[in-house]
Amino acid sequence: MQGQQAKIVSPTQERAMLGYLATTRCPARDRVMFLWSLKAGLRAKAMALLTWTMVTDAQGQIADVMHVPNRTRKGKTGGRTMPLHPDLQAALVTLQTARGDVATPERPILCSERGAGIRCAHSRSAAQRLRSARSAPPATP
């Protein structure tokens, strides 16, 4: 089965989406999910399985790179180390600060309001809701 080509998000659409995400129940978490998809190209499964250890340094601060082990992605060999986009890095700092003591190394980054890690299906359905709620005008050529 062939996948679909990813659609390009214009800067106007990105600003509109980030503005919308600021009004949701969990704006910090939703912003991180959107930026992971947009800036890092992560899939729902990878987002759902990432823990704070994968994005923090030895002191527990958000690092400049993200370590994505093989179990969180489609690949079969080794993991991947990816630089964090500055916008994503800032969003992770905000989320880590908002979570406080709950943001421990072994905990998932994306959690529900009840504190449990979100499932891959939730990541996908959240992304679908965001796409349908997007009120930005279509990109102009």
Image: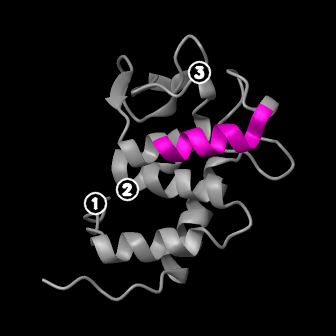
Q: Is residue 45 visible?
A: no
Residue 33 in the figure: left or right of residue 76 = right
Considering only order in the chain, which callout, 3 or 1, is on the residue closer to the N terminus? 1
Do the residues under discs 1 and 3 have CB atoms within 8 angstroms? Answer: no
Residue designated by label 3: 53
| Quarter-of-image position of residue 20 | bottom right
Furthest-left residue in this view: 141
What's the magenta region? 90-100
Q: Return the residue at label 2.
A: 38
User: Looking at the image, which is closer to me, 11 or 40?
Assistant: 11
Which label sits in the foreground, 1 or 3?
Answer: 3
x and y percentages locating residue 34 in the rendered image: 49, 58
- Three-letter amino acid code at disc 2? Leu
Q: Which numbered disc, 2 or 1, marks the residue that appears first in the sequence?
A: 1
Label 3 and label 2: CA atoms lie apart by 21 Å
Does any portion of residue 66 appear in the rendered image?
yes
Residue that numbered label 1 is attached to: 2
Q: Which marked residue is nearer to the observer: mark 2 or mark 1? A: 2
Circle 3 sits in a helix, a strand or a loop, which is it?
helix
SS for callout 2:
helix
Residue 97 among magenta residues = yes
Left or right: where does residue 94 sit relative to residue 55?
A: right
Name the amino acid, label 1.
Answer: Gln
